[in-house]
Amino acid sequence: TADWHEREAYDLIGIEYDDHPDLRRILLPETWQGHPLSLDYDEDRPQIVTLSENEPVEPGASTATGSDTMLLNVGPHHPATHGVLHLQVTLDGEDVLDVEPDIGYIHRCEEQMAQSGTYRHQIMPYPDRWDWGGGGLLNEWAYARAAEDLADVEVPEYAQVVRTMAAEFSRILSHMLAMGAYALDVIGDFTATFMYAIQERERVQEVLEDLTGQRLMFNYFRLGGVVWDLPEPREAFLSEIREYLDGLPRRLEEYHDLLTRNEIIQLRTIDTGVLPPEVAKEYGCTGPVLRGSGVDYDLRRDDPYGYYDELDWDVVTEDGCDNYSRLLVRMREVEESARIIEQCVDLLEDWPEDERNIQANVPRTLRPDDDTEIYRAVEAAKGELGIYIRSDGTDEPARFKIRGPSFSNLQALPEMANGESIPDLIATLGSLDTIMGEVDR
């Protein structure tokens, strides 16, 4: 798993690693001059990157003289790549001999922007933009958890319950998009499964819009809690959630009819994209990708935060290690999210009015001690989303590093796709549920 992470550190900071098997840039073009996050980087230096300089192999050309293989470019502008992802695929006929993900097309230097913002007010709007597929509240929690532990901020119990409920709605948003897009990838089903999934997302977005005021970039969490309490009338809002939860089991049965019980889906996903558990761990895979390989690991239980350790729910795993298992894990996790939300609603309904503290008393300006550092992570929809922060004694981080789960999950794609066919490659890529804003950052 160090492979891509060390390449990223070399690319952005200029750190060189001895004996690295392939130490070259990963987010920026090979012709880029300097390392943008290094302290001596010249920001005024012009950068000119031509296609001929950055594309060493012409599309359709063989990779070696006399070779029968062919290089096929998939993406970066292709619906099945789930964003601006470029795959350089080496083919022998229809069989995949090798695939190299080429990333960085939407690199926005989110870490540098966070380093230029204050802990208390200016960083929190950014996390929603890492995973815009619905995982925004989970991303906000990743930053909140790291900064709160760094600054010794204690979040009120009531706010933890609200956070937990909102985060699980965010997880359902993400998984519904993953399921709908997967049907589009594998069986070209837009009119039924994809639209059903989008309709389900709309129901969740109605709830989250009532709670946060936004439909996509929620910006609801604050250091020390959340920005405001449940909307009034409170009883009507909680009733809206219960109504949604009551209808979810019936609708999930429909999704199973359309997806997991679909013969074409089964033919294309069972025993394809196989990722053995030991290989998944070696690459740092987390979330549904790891649990689809039978590894029982979930930060909500194994590194408890929020209100998860007070609630009754199960970690979902499947032992198939294939594309079908990863799809099934996400569908079953929607059921577990609903269980968690229902318990949170029960708690919030009976919470004494004079104890509904939504925020801790956080100083207006946070200045953690010089040279202190922290790493904290949450179980985001796609896996372990971690934040590393190092302080320099000011109100802005000296270093801010995002460990996006999609980054590590995507690194394992060659292990899963090599030796299979082109259609299997598309099904495998879709099963990873990557989102490029989180990969490139």
Image (cartoon, helix red, strand yellow):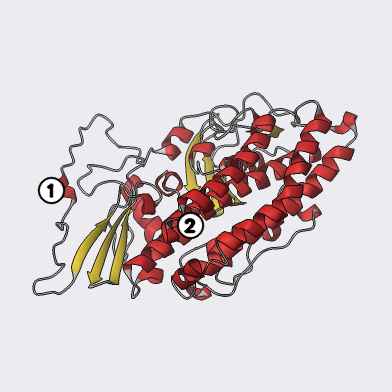
Q: Judge whether 427 appears above or below 189 on screen.
A: below
Query: Horizontal placement of 433 versus 377: left or right?
Result: left
Type of amino acid at the residue the image marks with label 1 = Ser
Q: Residue at the spot x=50%, y=44% of the render?
A: 131
Would you call the spot at circle 2 few (<14 residues within 10 Å), some (14-19), or many (20 or more)?
Answer: many
Hey, what amino acid is under mark 2?
Ala
* Residue at numbered disc 2: 183
Residue with the most extreme front position: 191
Asked if 188 appears above or below 39 in the picture, the reply is: below
Examine the rendering and report whether any part of residue 372 can be seen. Answer: no
The residue wearing badge 1 is 52
The residue under the point 53% across, 38% down is: 127
- Report the Cα–Cα distance between label 2 and label 1: 36 Å
Residue 421's spot in the image, x, y percent?
A: 33, 71
Q: Position of residue 26 (x, y in %)?
A: 32, 52
In the image, residue 337 lies at what x, y percent? 69, 52
Quadrant showing the N terminus: bottom left
Q: Nearer the viewer, residue 202 or 319?
A: 202
x%, y% of residue 307?
Answer: 76, 48
Q: Nearer the viewer, mark 2 or mark 1?
A: 2
Circle 2 SS class: helix
Q: Name the side, left or right, on which 396 lies relative to 68.
A: right
Secondary structure beneath dot 1 equals helix
Quarter-wise, where is residue 217 in the image? top right
The answer to whether residue 231 shows anywhere in this view is yes
Q: Nearer the viewer, residue 17 or 441?
A: 441
Tell which of 303 and 100 is nearer to you. Answer: 100
